[in-house]
Amino acid sequence: MSETIWMKIDSGETLSRDDMAALLSLTDEADRRVLYEKAYAVKIRETGPGVYFRGIIELGNICEKDCYYCGIRGSNGEVKRYLMEADEIVKTALWVHENRYGSLVLQAGELSGPAFITMIEQVLGRIREKTGGGLRVTLSLGEQTEETYRRWREAGAHRYLLRIETTNPDLYRRLHPEDHDFEARKACLGLLRRTGYQVGTGVMIGLPGQTAEDLADDILFYQKEDIDMIGMGPYLPHEATPMAEHFPDYVYDPDRQLRLGLNMIAVTRLVLKDVNIAATTALQALHPKGREMGVQAGANVVMPNATDTSYRESYQLYDNKPCLDENSGLCRGCLTRRIESVGEEVAFDEWGDSPHWVKRVSDELSL
Ligand code: SAM
Ligand code: SF4
C-alpha cells in the first residue's frame, strides 16, 4: 500500500474515491492490520470505548417483495411463514429492556397492509408505556409510505434501518425484479429523515458484479445522504434463491467476503468517522470471531438475536446462519464474552445514539 494513503489518513486529509478503492481491495495481512488499527483508533476517538447492544427481534418472515438474494423472498415456497403476535413481541422487547440492552431492533419481511401497520404502531406504544420510554427502538420493516413512517415515529420508534443494498443502479436492477425500484428506495431514506428518524442504511458487500469502486461509491453515498448509522454486511448465498441462475459466473469465496466486509467497515469508519456502524451477524457466519473482528476494524454496535429460537430456522436470509439454536440468554452471555475478549466492554443501559445524529440535532437546535 502506498505510503501516501497512510499519510493522508494520519493527517486527516480527504481520501479520494481511488484511495478508498485501493484500501477496500487490500489483501495483504500486514496492510490490513494497519488499516484496521487506524480505523479502530478513529472509532475510539469519535464514539468512545464500548460497544452498544441492540437486541433484535425478527418478528415475521412474510414478505411482499422478492429480492433475488434473500432466503425469505416472497416466492420461496420452502419457508414456513410466521408473524409473531403483538403480545409476544412486547414480551420479548421487555426481556431486551430487563437485560439492559438499551436498544431494540424490530425487523421483518416487508408488509404494507393496514392490519400490520396498526399492529406495529400499537406494539410501539405498548413498549414505550411499559418501559417508561427507556428503550431506543429501531425499525427495519422496509419501504413504507410517509404516513406509515410518521405513525410509527409518533408511536415510539426513533431509528430506521433501510439498506439501499447497492448504490449502483444497474447492479440494483440485476438483483431485483422489475417492480423493485432503486429510486423509490432511495426516496424512502429522504422520507425517514423528514419524519424525524435517526436514519440508517447499508449495502451488501461482495455481491456478484460489484467492484471496489462501487463500494467506494456506497461510502460516498452514505456521506452525501448524511446517514447516521450503517448496517452492512457480506452477501452470503442462499441455495433456494435464483442468484446462481442470474449470475452463473459468480464464484463465492468466503475468505474474500470476510476480508471485504472488514475492509468496508474500516474504510467507512475512516471516511464517516462519527456514525454508528454495526458488526453484523453475516460476519459471524463467515468466521466464528467475525463480529469481534468487525469491532476491531471500527464497528461500535452489535445486534444480539432476541428472537425465540423456535422462529430462527424460518428466518434464514442466507445459508448457515449462526446461533440458530442459541437462546437469547446464551446469546447475551456469549456475545458479552466475545466483546470482552477483544479488550472492549458492552455499554449496558445506554441508548448509544449515533454521535453524528447528536451533533446534527444540536446544530439544528442552535440555528
Ligand atoms: N425486509 C426489510 C428490508 O429488506 O429492508 C428488512 C428485512 S431484510 C431481511 C434485511 C436485510 O437482509 C436486507 O436489507 C438485505 O441487505 C439483507 N439480506 C437479505 N438477503 C441476504 C443475503 N443473502 N446475504 C446477506 N444479506 C442479506
Ligand atoms: Fe423481503 Fe427484505 Fe428479503 Fe427483500 S430483503 S425479500 S424485502 S425480507
Image (spheres, rainbow, N blue to C red):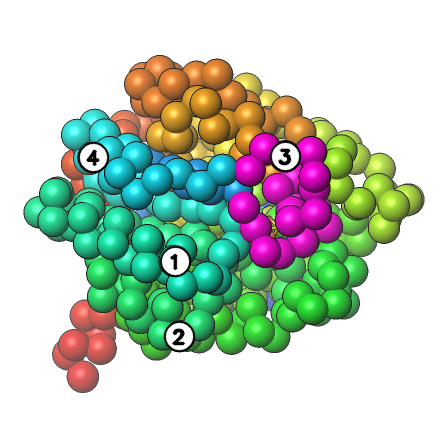
Residue 80: in magenta span: yes
Q: CA distance from mark 3 to mark 4?
A: 28 Å
Q: CA distance from mark 1 to mark 3?
A: 22 Å
Q: Amino acid at mark 2?
A: Glu
Q: Nearer the viewer, residue 111 or 70?
A: 111
Region of the chain picked out in magenta, as a range: 62-81
Q: CA distance from mark 2 to mark 1?
A: 17 Å
Residue type (three-letter) at the residue carrying disc 3: Val
User: Which label's residue is closer to the chain start, 3 or 2?
Assistant: 3
Q: Earlier in the sequence, mark 1 or mark 3?
A: 3
* Label 4 or label 1, whichever comes before in sequence order: 4
On-image quarter of the N terminus: top right
Which one is earlier in the sequence, the residue at label 2 or at label 1?
A: 1
Residue tagged 2 = 146
Residue 2 in view in this figure: no
Left or right placement of residue 282 versus residue 159 in this view = right
Q: Is residue 106 above or below residue 148?
A: above
